[in-house]
Image (cartoon, helix red, strand yellow):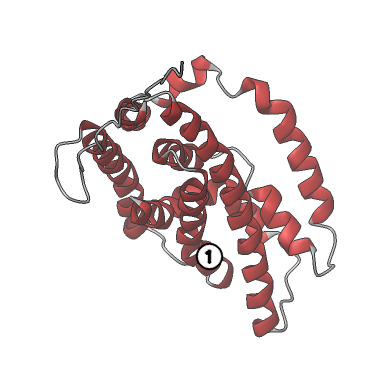
Amino acid sequence: MLASALVLGLLGSLHCLGMCGPIAFMLPLDRDNKAKKLMQMGVYHLGRALAYASMGLVFGFVGRGLYLFDFQQKLSIVIGALMIVLVLLPGKYLQRLGAARPIYGLVSKVKSRLGSELRKKTPDTFLTIGFLNGFLPCGLVYMALLGAIALGNPWQGALYMALFGMGTIPLMTSVVFFSSFLRGETRKMIQKLVPVFVILIGTLFILRGMGLGIPYVSPKAPPKVEVVTTDLECH
């Protein structure tokens, strides 16, 4: 399941260019020194990965809490089904739900801070910009967070999101160095692959929750351990 985060980030990074692309292009990079420019991009990506990992840690705790209530398999099935529904549901219906409205104020503050950081050229600027960038709303990030919840482990959730962030690095770096990268039919083909792969991940989570006994895909749930206590009365 962890490998799916890396592939989701790799394929989904083309979709993420709509939000992160303009920010990447506005980075105060050293245009005259390619080695320094590459290092600055690396620090920027490290900031994004840290942001994703911190969110994965938090949402992993949420999943862990649900697991403690013996909701392991059901949670995996619900998360998988939710992934598939969100991909198949037309965007106009998602907008009507208005689920993201409560965080609009927070997003506005993040964008304001980003604007001030983009005007700086200090060594820590790129790490800060990357970290703030990671908290901007993105549909693919939400999908990855659902996966972090389904894992039911905060550390695995953090790793899942970090791998997702790493998957976005190749394309996000390429568009900065090669502006004509991935245009035309190749871009359209990858965009079509993203929802297909999300549906595949959702299906894997559903199979995982069903506990069909398939190694690595749908392992059986561990048997419940009953604790028997014996009270002895001494006279």
The residue that disc 1 covers is 175
Number of marks in the rendered image:
1
Judge whether 48 appears above or below 102 on screen: below
Q: Position of residue 56 (x, y in %)?
A: 54, 44
**Where residue 148 appears, x then y in whole percent?**
45, 41
- Compared with 7, 144 (above or below) is above
Q: Amino acid at mark 1?
A: Val
Q: Residue at x 67, y 67 (%)?
A: 43
- For this view, does 48 lie left or right of residue 95? right
Vertical relation: 180 (above or below) 220 = below
Residue sitting at x 29%, y 29% = 77
Res 72 → quadrant: top left
Residue 234 appears in which quarter of the rendering? top left
Q: Is residue 143 rendered to the left or right of residue 177?
A: left
Q: Name above or below for residue 175 compared with residue 193.
A: below
Q: Residue at x 72, y 55 (%)?
A: 129
Camera-nearest residue between 65 and 20: 65
For the point 81% across and 54% down, the residue is 117
Task: Check disc 1: other Cα within 10 Å, few if <14, some if 14-19, many if 20+.
Answer: some
Between residues 218 and 51, which one lies in front from this camera angle?
218
Per the image, label 1 sits on a secondary structure element best described as helix
Q: Quadrant of residue 179?
A: bottom right
**Residue 162, position in %: x, y?**
52, 55
Residue 120 is situated, as x and y percent measured from the top left of the image, at 85, 61
